[in-house]
Amino acid sequence: MNKIDKIFNILKKKRCDSAVFNDAVNVRYISGYNAPDGIVVLTKKKSCLLVDYRYNGLKPERNDDNVLELVVTATPLVEAAYDILHTSGAKSAALDTSAMSYDLVKKFRGVFDSVKCVGISGICKEMRSSKDEYELDMIRKAQKITDDAFDYILGKISPEMTENELAAELEYFIRRRGGGISFDTIAVSGTMSAVPHGTPRDVKIGKNTFVTMDFGATWNGYHADMTRTVVLGKADDDMKTVYNTVLEAQKRGLAAARAGISGSEVDEAARTFIAEQGFGGNFTHSLGHSVGLEIHEAPGFSKMSMSFLPVNAVVTVEPGIYIPGKYGVRIEDMVVLKEDGSINLTSSPKELIEL
Ligand SMILES: [Mn+2]
């Protein structure tokens, strides 16, 4: 079943015969085109992506039956959308309100004269959690560039480099390879590595402390996400204990990760080990999140995640230990969930690297 058929099944349950999407990510997901300002209109008679002339001649990103007809129009898009709904005899349209302002909802309601608007958030949310082959392929490509960037930086990094320079080098490598930047690169050392999402500073990386790099490339809109922590110089015994505790917790999380169980079970597998080693209070975030057209998607591996994980969800496994005022360690891979386990998409080494 293609995506449009799946969406119509969802709409039926909501008693809607048509739908309108304006959220840039959902538009890309449903239409197969990267047209952030376009509107997707789905009706029983006609489904299309409406765009203005800035996207004239745009080619789809994928080549299968998940590509909509591209309609370029000079008519304001909300009015053009209504024309299609009206002509198709639609009675009740689902408005994907995931990224709509109150003002925009009012505008749709004002223009959609004979068609009832039903605001529904997250129509595609569950569908997007299980990736198809094209999506997995894009994520693999994004992760390949990300792994290559890590390999490159190991030959480039030095104690004299600042955190900002380190972040810039990673991003420059990704850009040269044609990738986009998945999110603001985290490249932090020493005390700043104790902040899980610390911001890079104009401070030299220095020696004999942890350097954490959390970064990723995108490919056709699909994200990669990876974290590695390394040491320039030598790690002392305490540092080795912290590092190897995170590494073992990550391995336990990876071993537990599979489809058909709840995210909390996977989180628990890693968290219990860290707590047993006496660092329970230092693992202050959830174990992982899904990744796709957005860097953070549902479902995740967290204490609160009770829903069952689907086959082909792409999820991160990223335990960490953070000792405030001192340093922190995080190790993150991305995996595809299968019924009997998971496939690791990340190939970078993760035994402690001392450079
Ligand atoms: Mn992550």
Image (cartoon, helix red, strand yellow):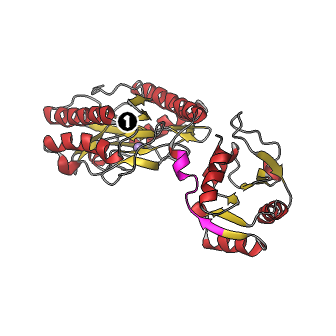
Residue 255 in picture, x, y percent from top left:
30, 31
232 falls in the magenta region? no
Q: Quadrant of the C terminus?
A: top left
Q: Is residue 72 left or right of residue 186?
A: right
Return the residue nearer the eye: 152 or 240.
240
Tell me: is circle 1 under 8 Å from ligand 1.
Answer: no
Mark 1, residue position: 258
| Image quadrant, ligand 1 | top left
Residue 164 in picture, x, y percent from top left:
43, 43
Label 1: how many Cα within 10 Å (few below 14, some 14–19, many 20+): many
In the image, what residue occupies the spot 46% across and 37% down?
Answer: 311
Return the residue nearer the eye: 76 or 304.
304
Residue 247 in picture, x, y percent from top left:
26, 33
Residue 190 visible here: no
Q: Is residue 264 left or right of residue 172?
A: left
The segment highlighted magenta reads 118-128
SS at mark 1 in the image: loop
Residue 278 in picture, x, y percent from top left:
13, 44
